[in-house]
Image (cartoon, rainbow, N blue to C red):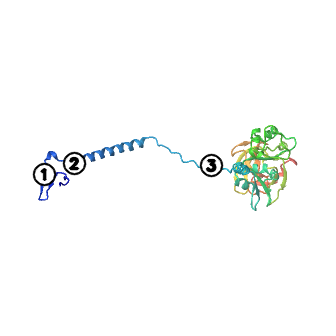
Amino acid sequence: MHAQPIIGYNVRMDYDAAQVTERPASSRRANPWPARLASAGVVVLALWLLATLAAFADPILIPPAATPAPTPPEDADDLANFAMRRQALTRPRLRTYIVQDGDTASGIAARFGLDVDTLRWSNPDLEEKPDYLRLGMKLVILPMRGAYYQVRAGDTLDALALRYGVAITDIVEYPLNGLKWGSPLVAGAWLVVPYGTKELSRPHPNPAPGYDFAWPIVGYVTQHYSAGHPALDIGAPYGSAVYAARAGVVVYATWAETGYGYMVLVEHGGGYATVYSHLKGAWVSAGQSVARGQLIGEVGSTGNSTGPHVHFEIRVNGVRSNPLGFLPAEP
């Protein structure tokens, strides 16, 4: 019986004795580890080359798994309700806002990302007096800037588009209007006019060449001159044009921190100056020369104001004087 050979030696074992004889060097088995290490080095080098090439290659973008769409109901009635609910969530909608204590037209408009004009043109009670808000008053809030118009008998799309400065397509294709091409307008229906604007047509005040000053606007006096109020308050619809009462140079046309809101001050020479305040905005800038009767701003209700009007002052050598002593009896 012979045992298995051990590497490097030939072992032969008898029952009587064990005789070990060394193999010649030429017959020894070669050591495999150098070859194995060399192979491993080749593999490492190959992996390094692949990593280097990958770093300079364009990345492979794997799109995220798509979110499965909600499965609509199978029943026909439920399917219709599902479609209506889905449409309602995506279409624009009108809102109703109830006026709270301390609300202002500008504040409400800003809250919904609108402007005061959109609030005015969506609520007839506010068109001429946008700050005439009553506690608990309900206001229509449009989903975008524009106007909300109630159709009258005889109205046409051509006339409405022209009046509000928009394209007919803007009105017909707006989802809330429910209109179809070729269908007549229904009297009494309300239409959203996206981004529509209304221009107020107001008469121009008499230039009154025989007087020292002309009226800055055609309106009505809401508060007369007095010791506690050394000016005239002239009421007019919001956005009405305001004109220079006399030729001069604008020295101030910006927001005033004194409660005047937007204000324009014009110097006329000879110690005379005029002030126009609570404006919606100014159409002139400081240093600009203006002619008698030139547009300088629009009626607003900014600053400490109780409604749209122009606070009009005539100053003589810095003293605020009664404007009625310099103006014609009527504008």
Which label sits in the foreground, 2 or 3?
2
Can residue 273 be seen in the rendering of this structure? no
Give coordinates of residue 196: x percent, y percent: 76, 43
Give coordinates of residue 35: x percent, y percent: 25, 45
Q: How crowded is mark 1: few (under 14 residues within 10 Å), some or many (20 or more)?
A: few
Q: How crowded is mark 3: few (under 14 residues within 10 Å), some or many (20 or more)?
A: few
Q: Which of 208 and 52 is in front in this view?
A: 52
Determine whether the residue tagged by mark 3 lies in a helix, strand or loop.
Answer: loop
Disc number placed over residue 22 in the picture, else none: 1
What residue appears at the point 87 percent right and 47 percent down from the top-left corner?
330
The disc, 2 or 3, on the residue closer to the chain's N-terminal end is 2
Determine whether the residue tagged by mark 1 lies in a helix, strand or loop.
Answer: strand
> Residue tagged by mark 2?
31
C-alpha span from label 3 to label 1: 80 Å
* Amino acid type of the residue tagged 2 in the rendering: Asn
The disc, 2 or 1, on the residue closer to the chain's N-terminal end is 1
C-alpha span from label 2 to label 3: 65 Å
| Quarter of the image with the N terminus in it | bottom left
Disc number placed over residue 69 in the picture, else none: 3
* Amino acid type of the residue tagged 3 in the rendering: Ala
Determine whether the residue tagged by mark 2 lies in a helix, strand or loop.
Answer: loop
Give coordinates of residue 85: x percent, y percent: 71, 51
Q: Nearer the viewer, residue 9 or 149?
A: 9
What residue appears at the point 87 percent right and 43 percent down from the top-left corner?
153
Disc number placed over residue 94 in the picture, else none: none
Q: Give the residue furthest to the bottom.
A: 101
Q: Which of 216 and 182 is in front in this view?
A: 182
Above or below, 252 against 133 in this view is: above
Q: Which of 54 and 14 is in front in this view?
A: 14
* Amino acid type of the residue tagged 1 in the rendering: Glu
